[in-house]
Image (cartoon, helix red, strand yellow):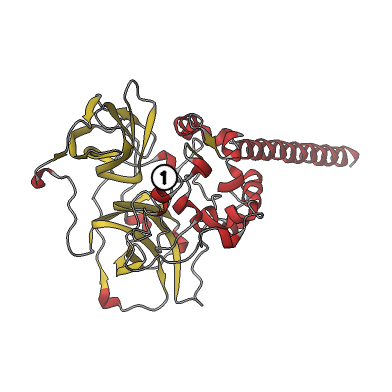
Amino acid sequence: MSIGVGRNRRSCLIFLVLALSLAFLLEVRGAFLQSELESGTACLRCHKDDYEEDLSHGLIHQPCLENRCSVCHCSSKSVATVAGGGSDAVSTVSKPAAIDAGGEFKVIDSAVRSAFSHSFIFADDQVREALRVELWQGSELKKVEMVALAPLAKLPRLVDDKQAPKVYDVKIEQVDTGLSSSAKISWKTDKPAIAKVRYGINGLEKKGSGSRSLKRNHSLEFESLKSNRKYRVVVVAIDFFGNRSVSEEFELSTEKNYLAPLQEFSLREKDDCEIVESLFYNVGDRYLALFELSRNLSISIGVEKNYDENQVVAGHDLGGEINSGLAEVAASSSGQLHDFLVSEQDLNIKNCLDCHKGIRREMSHPVDVLPSPSMKVPSDYDLLANGRISCMTCHVRHAGDNSFRLVREQGKKFCSGCHLTH
């Protein structure tokens, strides 16, 4: 009898020791993950090139300078939740919640910058059988489509083929010379990828804005180039899994105006605002949606409680497994999706006002408002996907060289970007 009691006590003691050890390891792991997020170490695994380029500018946002990405990009609650391994707080703080049957329409995500191509990642519990897609041109809602969604299990899964995307058919489409020259280039990749551009006169020290949407057809406009110069340019392409390639270096000259024949333009705007193609894939048991549009447009996606099933259009998906994607958007080095990031609205307005409480509102440009319908906002003045003005419409994220990190030099040139009659 005493032998059995002794064995039970030993078993209980062993179980208790194991439970306490596990709790201790989880606490250490949580502290380590929280420290990595708060310090920006985890971010640099994928975004090191961007960070180093930011540090090359004269005016750097203080959290960026200190490599504290979480100050703006994460909520304190979501960082703690990721560190602790939980999920409930993340769902309520930083990512769109699951469908609320009480609402007529719920936005899942938005793409701020106007483009021909957009990509989104969202969870299965955020959507129904159809996805509401809104196409915006500035502050004007141009079109709404209901796009059918197949169950995740029936969609092709992304696989990593370890092959870097190939960059080809690089073209200079337009060069406009003057006191401040501009140019447009285009290129293609053999599978969906994001792209960055490195350029400079003597080296490749400058970085173009590039694209953070997965696409095969790419284009980029350069602003504020020096006239009568020859620039060295390379394109960097990155697929979903982080496989990276660099194009051969080519020359971009601002010595004279140039306009390629219309048929050589890679992307030509059409009169109608349409979704040309919608592709859906399964990545980490989530939806990856790719949209090709007929024009440069902003886009919002969401769910609608009540909709006419006769208005739902079929989505397009490729059969079999495909090899494409984007590690910097979809997954960190540990393979976890970026659920802890704050919304675009919080990132571009709320977080700015939370820190910069001393600004005089009457001396600052209004935010969260729509520009005048007759106003044409330049492409380098970013609007939110719903067409509204944010702090980042006038200011550059992270780092810049103009005073107050404005998108253009302070003064009449800056204001006249939008206010042409002032």
Q: Quadrant of residue 12?
A: top right
Identify the residue shown where x is 52% and y is 50%.
Answer: 339
Left or right of 401 on screen, residue 253: left
In this orientation, does residue 287 appear? Answer: no
**Residue 354 percent across, percent down from the top left:** 64, 55
Identify the residue shown where x is 23% and y is 30%.
Answer: 252
Type of amino acid under label 1: Arg
Left or right of 138 on screen, residue 126: right
Q: Quadrant of residue 305?
A: bottom left
| Nearer to the camera, 384 or 30 | 384
In this orientation, does residue 109 appear? Answer: yes
| Nearer to the camera, 221 or 411 | 411
The kind of secondary structure element at disc 1 is loop
- Report the number of numbered marks: 1
Residue annotated with mark 1 = 408
Specify few, some or many for label 1: CA neighbours under 10 Å numbering under 14, 14-19, or 20 or more.
Answer: many
Left or right of 257 on screen, residue 29: right
Q: Up-down: is 312 above or below 59?
A: below
Identify the residue shown where x is 28% and y is 33%.
Answer: 165
Is the N terminus in the top left, top right, bottom left or bottom right quadrant? top right
**Residue 378 percent across, percent down from the top left:** 34, 53
Q: Up-down: is 292 above or below 16?
A: below
- Which residue sits furthest right? 2
Q: Up-down: is 41 above or below 278?
A: above
**Residue 386 percent across, percent down from the top left:** 40, 64
**Residue 134 percent across, percent down from the top left:** 34, 66
| Nearer to the camera, 200 or 194 | 200
Is the C terminus in the top left, top right, bottom left or bottom right quadrant? bottom left
